[in-house]
Amino acid sequence: MTGAELLEFIRKGSRGRFFCIEFVKRTTGELRPMLCRYGVRKYVTGVGMAFNPNEQNLVVVWDVKKKAYRMIPLEGVVRVKVRGEWQEVLR
């Protein structure tokens, strides 16, 4: 599954609902599970980001436990749980 296909799967599969994702962090290489939500617009200041996350192969989500926006590297995603079903991502 390519990065664009994975992003489309997350966007259409979650439809604004919560989903679980496991990915390998770029900085430390550790496996990071996350309960998150795609498409959250709360707490946006209107200033914008200094870069385009799509160009860096990142997807912006709302981390439920940390109550903050986080970025997930699409190339590091191991599996995604959307609507109760785990989807393994083969690389």
Image: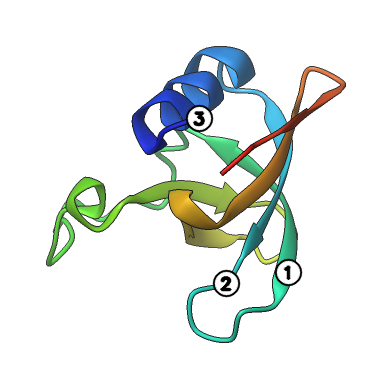
**Dot 3 or dot 2, earlier in sequence:** 3
Q: Residues within 10 Å of mark 1 (few under 14, many from 20)?
A: some
Question: From the viewer's perspective, is residue 68 above or below residue 9?
Answer: below
> What's the residue at 73%, 69% (across, down)?
31
Badge 2 is on which residue?
25
Badge 3 marks a residue whose secondary structure is loop
> What's the residue at 69%, 78% (across, down)?
30
Q: Residues within 10 Å of mark 2 (few under 14, many from 20)?
A: some
Rounded to the nearest angstrom, the CA distance separating label 1 from label 2 is: 6 Å
Q: Amino acid at mark 1?
A: Leu
**Dot 1 or dot 2, earlier in sequence:** 2
**Dot 1 or dot 3, earlier in sequence:** 3
Rounded to the nearest angstrom, the CA distance separating label 1 from label 3 is: 19 Å
Q: Are marks 1 and 2 in contact (CB under 8 Å)?
A: yes
Badge 1 marks a residue whose secondary structure is strand
Badge 2 marks a residue whose secondary structure is loop
Q: Which mark is residue 1?
A: 3
The image quadrant that residue 7 belongs to is top left
> What's the residue at 25%, 56% (across, down)?
45
Taking depth in this image into account, of 67 and 74 the one nearest to the observer is: 74
Question: From the viewer's perspective, is residue 23 above or below residue 86?
Answer: below
> What's the residue at 16%, 56% (across, down)?
48
Q: Is residue 10 left or right of residue 66?
A: left
Taking depth in this image into account, of 64 and 45 the one nearest to the observer is: 64
Q: Amino acid at mark 3?
A: Met
